[in-house]
Structures are given as C-alpha cells and as structure tokens.
Amino acid sequence: MTPIMPLASLVETASVVLFAVAIIHTFSTKFFEHLAHVNRTHAGLWHLLGEVEAVFGFWALILLLFVAVHLGPPQAVGYLEGLNFTEPAFVFVIMVIAASRPVLEFAGAALRVIARLLPLPQTAAYYLTALSVGPLLGSFITEPAAMTLCALLLRDRYFAKDAPAVFKYATIGVLFVNISIGGTLTPYAAPPVLMVAGTWGWDTAFMMATFGWKAALAVLVNAAAVTAIFHRQLLRLADGLPGDKVDRIPAPVIFVHLAFLAGVVVFSHHAVVFSGLFLFFLGFTEAYKRYQSRLILREGLMVAFFLAGLVTLGGMQKWW
C-alpha cells in the first residue's frame, strides 16, 4: 500500500501547484476582465482577478489558507512572520517618492539639460537621454526609482501623444532591458547583484571595472538603436509637454523631496527607518499640497502586493 504523503510534503507540493497556477493566471487576466463585463453581479471580483499585480497576492492567500488547514493557523502565521518583506515595502515607498511632482520635474529638467548637449533635434535627444542616462541612474537611486522616473517622463512626453503602438512597445522593451542592466554600476542597486555582493566582496570599483562599463555601453547602444529606428517618428512628435500651467515649484521643496529620496535609498535595507521617512514625506506633501500632483499610492501598493505575493509563494519553492 502506498504510504500517505506527509503533511509537510503535501504543503510543498501544493505550493508548487499554486505557484504554477499563479503564473498561468498572470497570462490569463484578460479572461477575467471579460468575465467582469459579462457577469455584472460579481464584476468587482473579476476585476480584482484581472489585475496583474493582484495575481500572486491572491494565490499567496490561498497558500496560507491551505497551510492553516493542514498544519494549523500557528504554522501559517509562523511561516509568514519568517519571511522578509523589506523589498516590497521599499519598492512601494521609493515608487511613490520618485513619482512625486517635484522629483519628476527635477529629473525632467536635468535630462533636458543633457539633451541640449547632443547634436540632435531636441525631441530625439530627450528620448535618447531618457532611455540611456535615466536607466543608468538606477545604479545610484535604485532600479525601481529609475524605472518609475523614466516611465513617467516618457509617458508624459511621448505616450500621451498620438504615437503608433510599435513605437510604444519598442520604447517599453528597451526601457525594461536598460533598467535591468543599468543598475550594475554599483553593488547595491540591482537585487541580483545585491544578493552576492557582500559575500563575494564586490565594491563599487569592482562593479564599475567588471560589469559597469559593459552595461553602460549596452545601454547606450540600445537607446541609440531605438532612437535611430524611430527617428522620423520622433521628429513628428511635438516637443512641448501637454497640460495647463501650474505653480512653479520652489527649490527648497525640490531639495526636500530629493533628500527624502536619498534617505530612503541609503536606508533601503532598514524598513523601520525608511517607513518612518515615508510618513514624514506624506506629512510634507500635505503641508505643501499646491506643489504636488496625485501620489501614486494605489499603483505603488499594487506593485508591493505583487512582490509580497511572490515572496510568500517563492519561499516555499526552495526545496526544488
């Protein structure tokens, strides 16, 4: 007679199955969006299941319920408390601060200064700069912050206009690749590097000499290639930014926002510290509301929820 599977082994097997289901669900969100339009009675649930960022968090909840049923609630709580959710919390905080209006305007102004130095039409020069210099900033302000900045700046300047889909997809593709490799100039900005840098003794000098210059070269080549391919399309785009006139942001307000951004980056591995800084940041934005745009709290929370779900499901995958 075949022995009954031990409970711990059963949980591990269930975690693998749920992990696979979560991956399949990620590529099936349009189906749930369709159900939301067809079945109005439970449209809210189908919309939730149609959110890509909610997928892993949803199946992580199912896993915890499964563990609670088969091993007991204390085991489920103990497993959850044994996980490290510092990275999801950090990504949420850094996204919100990096996407604040003062930081975006400062970054946009800096990119425009660099773009004016290039012997290209300004629309193409700014595009090239955003896809090259922007991702390389990820080595200093971390990749999530650089991704948020570059994506929002490109959205406002190019995606808000009547640009063809192929141009948008190519831009997003190059941005993803450049952000992924642009954080390798330092040992603390890219998660894969961070995991081994301390153990292997990699410092900034080593990263620059071994990986950094190669990554910087690849980022420049990628950005230059996509700029050349869509050069005519870029020329057809107006150089001005859409929108009404808004209050000019005082330099001290920009400086405080940049100080919060720097503080969160410096204490990125200390959730208590950067969470406290974030609370002060929220208070500051409320005090100077006239110089703020809507904070991307919902968007940041959804990304953090996705990462937290990935941590919860991924923690059970170590055995294989």
Image (cartoon, grey):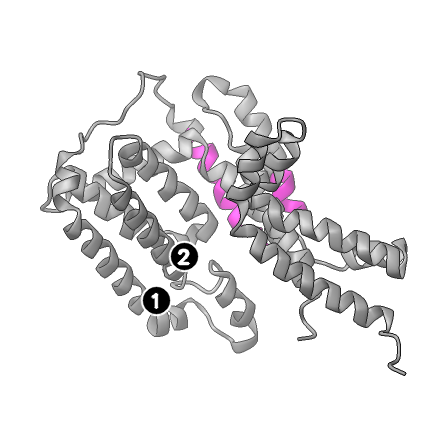
Q: Residues within 10 Å of mark 1 (few under 14, many from 20)?
A: many
Rendered image quadrant of residue 287: top right
Residue type, mark 1 in image: Gly
Instruction: Specify the amino acid type for callout 2.
Output: Ser
Residue under the point 24% across and 39% down: 164
Screen quadrant of the C terminus: bottom right
Image marks 1 and 2: residues in contact by CB distance under 8 Å: yes
Describe residue 134's horizontal placement relative to residue 284 as left or right: left
Residue 150 image point, x, y percent: 36, 43
Label 2: which residue?
139
Residue 268 appears in view: no
Residue 263's mark?
Answer: none
Majority secondary structure of the magenta segment? helix
Question: Which residues, given as a range, are shown in magenta?
Answer: 254-277
**Image mark for residue 212:** 1
Residue located 73% across and 49% down the image: 61
Which quarter of the rendered picture does the N terminus lie within?
bottom right
- Does the rendering let one see residue 38? yes
**Does 183 appear above or below 1?**
above
